[in-house]
Image (cartoon, rainbow, N blue to C red):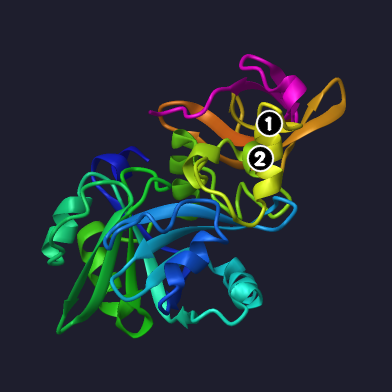
Amino acid sequence: MTRVREQGGWTSLDRSLIRVSGPNRAKFLHNLLSNDIQGLAPGQSRLAALMNLKGHQVAWMRVLVESEALICELPTRVRDTVVETFIHYKVGAPVRFEKTAATVFGLFGAKSGEILAALGVSPMPAEKETFTTKTGSEGTLRVSRGQDLPAAGFTLHVPEGESGALEAALRTWLGEPMAPQTLETLRVEEGLPWHGFDVAEENLLHETGQLSVYHSSSKGCYLGQEVVARLEGRGGNVNKKFVGLKSASELSRGLEMEVDGKAVGRVTSAGVSPEFGPIAMGYVHRSHAEPGTRVQVKEGEAEIVTLPFRT
């Protein structure tokens, strides 16, 4: 983890792209997603949630605004479901959806800027939720800087048939790809939940602690709005909360948290940090969510702590 932060690391991410085009594309997505899409300019992006009418999380995604289309970057496992949902709500609107054949890489650490400059990326996406697209004889590369990525990370979108050259370059500069566990630990250190790991369809946005990131309080008319508004009216109180855990022994995803022999929560992501030791994230019942609370996990104890571990 220290090496990645101080130097760099890369990996292939299990993410896919959906290209949304047509004259009403921004209005269409704005009316479905939890965050403000219409207010974005080309070169900007925003994280947003696609929920169902019960307020459950169908998918989390990044929406990137190009001059002729919107690009949705999201976990591969939910791409087909999202496209089907888009088609269901299209109802004659002049909007088109294309599953883009692309590979998505993650680039992390202090050397990221140096490597992107060597790839000819200019201007560099300096602010979070901005991106740059480089088009040349060797192909197209879209580079996005996102607030859901640890270690000052970027996502790199490259057409599937052109990914080999980029992968070879990343290997030359940074060696072998990061192990999945390294990326998970980096996320836990910074308290960054990902859909498919820490967030499932069963979850409500308020439970995840990411309401301010994936939701705009000033917009209306989106799927799940009534549930979100009702929870806001009740002070955002939900039965479980997303918290950090610190332990003397290693934790792992899926372990149950118990108090007095009763299950009160579950670990969703975990790792061993060089700085913080065994740490994890997960959901715990609100009655046991106060920082400092001790819970039983496997054969040891863990302490509930406030996220993130690293700021």
User: What label sits on residue 233 in the rendered view?
Assistant: 1
Q: Position of residue 62 (x, y in %)?
A: 44, 58
Task: Tell me which residue sits at (65%, 49%) in the image.
Answer: 225
Task: Tell me which residue sits at (16%, 64%) in the image.
Answer: 121
In contact (CB < 8 Å): disc 2 and disc 1: yes
Q: Position of residue 105 (x, y in %)?
A: 36, 64
Task: Tell me which residue sits at (50%, 38%) in the image.
Answer: 212
Q: Which residue is mark 2?
A: 229
Which amino acid type is shown beneath numbered disc 1? Gly
Observer able to see residue 134: yes
Quarter of the image with the C terminus is top left
Secondary structure found at label 1: helix
Count residues near mark 2 (Cα–Cα under 10 Å), then give few for <14, some for 14-19, many for 20+.
Answer: some
User: What label sits on residue 61 in the rendered view?
Assistant: none
Give the residues drawn in magenta, as a range. Answer: 285-311
Task: Tell me which residue sits at (42%, 61%) in the image.
Answer: 63
Q: Is residue 305 left or right of residue 138?
A: right
In front here: 97 or 161?
A: 97
Which amino acid type is shown beneath numbered disc 2? Ala
Q: Is residue 260 left or right of residue 244?
A: right
Secondary structure found at label 2: helix
In front here: 221 or 35?
A: 221
Q: CA distance from mark 2 to mark 1?
A: 6 Å
Q: Position of residue 295 (x, y in %)?
A: 73, 22
**Is residue 73 on the magenta stretch?**
no
